[in-house]
Image (spheres, grey):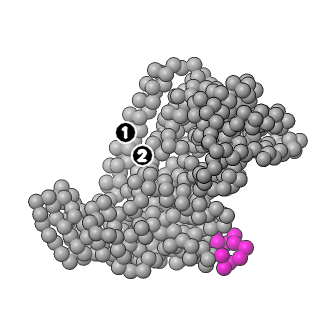
């Protein structure tokens, strides 16, 4: 199947022709057409204009070119008709796929995949030294086995690059640029090693900062969600902050923390983090370890869902899969169904509440539903206690003392390896003790009042 867009009405930006592949028997989180629509949004965010798209269903990927030879020739012809500059695949291409496709499409057309595109977007939005280091590391690790001309489009798009991320590589572009293609593998390995050392310093610094925050006993709520779900808008609403907001994917990259007073005067720290997306590149997950640890150290995750999106459930699944990948699946979750002010039929908000466990409907833009969200947060973090039994080794003396001081202790058993405590804890402490739980997770109150998330 193929579609073309007339080029006469399009501005002269770099032009991308999209290619989607679906293997029979392998269903992705999003239907093929919806995944390509998301890829088109990513392309627009990166400064490209989409001039057409093609899809193919295969029994198995072609060993050389991923798609079949006939489809390759069809796309080459359509790319010529639409004056495309880039062939953009919705899958991560292997180094062999990239080399073979470049040989077929020739010098005029460049081959990019979804991973390369997301890395470019992250490079555009890395506004701090930490973000720039993380993006550069991810780019080099992606490019190392390829070392092709796939990144030369960065020099010509969005006015020729810029931003602090570009300065890190020393080439004046958003991350590694064309001149880096001439650098041998040993030099790139050396650069990767240096970046990892710098990011380890960042990780240690962040860990020290988190330890100080933990000592304050102020709970930390981390906002997570699919990209463009409205997390930054919600943080601005909660804290009267001025976090950058834009109607585009990955508008916010660097984490931002703000202190907020909940009803009853209870303090809480809210942290906004980078949005997730399906097929999130593994190189990004690894490079953003220091930032993603903010999520793994949270007391509660506030999962922001764009309830108006037709694939809201699939997006939520992608978020939960990423949380499991970064070992944050044990942290209690409260879901905020955002953008209810945009629903054509208000009853859809009620239907969505039934579809998402432990959820509250809100509009971060208008403030609709915010009192209920704040009340629920106050209940979960401070007012409701959940039963729990944990076995703590003696080296966790701080947690043993915390359980006695902040929890309700019903039973204590000592053995040579540690102490078993049974009782109840306020929601703000559950995540800290979850790794030591020895009984199936339970809830002392209905799901809306907090406790461990289902499952």
Kindly report the distance in space between the C-alpha atoms of the residues bearing marks 1 and 2: 9 Å
Which segment did they paint magenta? 339-348
Q: Quadrant of the C terminus?
A: bottom left
Element marked by disc 1 = helix
Q: Is residue 269 visible?
A: no
Q: Position of residue 134 (x, y in %)?
A: 48, 39
Q: Is residue 358 above or below residue 298?
A: below
Query: Which residue is painted at 35% across and 74% down in the image?
Result: 442
Say the numbered circle drawn on residue 201: 1
Q: Is residue 32 left or right of residue 144?
A: right
Residue receiving disc 2: 290
Q: Is residue 258 left or right of residue 339?
A: left
Q: Earlier in the sequence, mark 1 or mark 2?
A: 1
Residue placed most toward the observer, 188 or 114: 114
Q: Position of residue 4 (x, y in %)?
A: 83, 44
Query: Which residue is painted at 40% across and 54% down in the image?
Result: 327
């Amino acid at each position: 199947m193929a579609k073309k867009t007339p080029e006469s009405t399009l501005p002269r930006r770099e032009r991308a022709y999209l290619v989607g592949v679906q293997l029979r028997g392998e269903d992705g989180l999003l239907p093929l057409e919806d995944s390509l629509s998301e890829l088109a949004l990513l392309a627009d965010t990166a400064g490209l204009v989409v001039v057409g798209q093609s899809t193919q269903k295969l029994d198995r990927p072609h060993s050389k070119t991923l798609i079949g030879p006939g489809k390759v020739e069809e796309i080459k012809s359509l790319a010529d008709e639409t004056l495309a500059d880039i062939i953009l695949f919705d899958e991560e291409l292997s180094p062999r796929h990239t080399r073979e496709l470049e040989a077929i499409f020739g010098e005029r057309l460049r081959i990019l995949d979804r991973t390369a595109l997301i890395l470019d977007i992250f490079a555009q939005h890395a506004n701090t030294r930490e973000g720039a280091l993380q993006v550069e590391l991810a780019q080099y690790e992606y490019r190392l086995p390829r070392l092709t001309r796939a990144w030369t489009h960065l020099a010509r798009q969005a006015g020729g690059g810029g931003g602090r991320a570009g300065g890190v590589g020393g080439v004046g572009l958003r991350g590694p640029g064309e001149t880096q293609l001439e650098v041998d593998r040993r030099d790139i390995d050396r650069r990767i090693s240096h970046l990892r050392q710098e990011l380890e310093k960042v990780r240690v610094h962040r860990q020290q900062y988190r330890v100080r925050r933990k000592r304050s006993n102020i709970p930390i709520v981390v906002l997570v969600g699919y990209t463009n779900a409205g997390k930054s808008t919600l943080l601005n609403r909660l804290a009267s902050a001025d976090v950058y907001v834009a109607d585009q994917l990955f508008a916010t990259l660097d984490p931002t923390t703000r202190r907020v007073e909940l009803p009853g005067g209870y303090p809480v720290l809210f942290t906004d983090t980078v949005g997730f997306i399906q097929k999130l590149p593994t190189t990004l997950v690894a490079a953003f370890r220091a930032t993603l640890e903010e999520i793994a150290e949270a007391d509660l995750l506030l999962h922001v869902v764009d309830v108006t999106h037709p694939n809201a459930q699939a997006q939520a699944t992608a978020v939960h899969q990423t949380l499991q990948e970064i070992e944050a699946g044990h942290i209690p979750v409260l879901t905020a169904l955002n953008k209810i002010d945009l629903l054509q039929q208000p009853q859809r908000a009620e239907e969505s509440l039934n579809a998402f466990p432990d959820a509250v409907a809100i509009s971060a833009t208008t403030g609709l539903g915010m009192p209920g969200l704040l009340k629920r947060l106050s209940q979960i973090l401070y007012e409701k206690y959940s039963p729990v039994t944990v076995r703590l080794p003696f080296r966790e003396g701080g947690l043993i003392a915390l359980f006695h001081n902040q929890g309700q202790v019903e039973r204590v058993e000592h053995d040579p390896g540690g102490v078993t405590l049974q009782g109840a804890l306020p929601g703000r402490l559950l995540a800290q003790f979850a790794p030591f739980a020895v009984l199936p997770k339970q809830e002392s109150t209905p799901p809306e009042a907090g406790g461990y998330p289902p499952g």
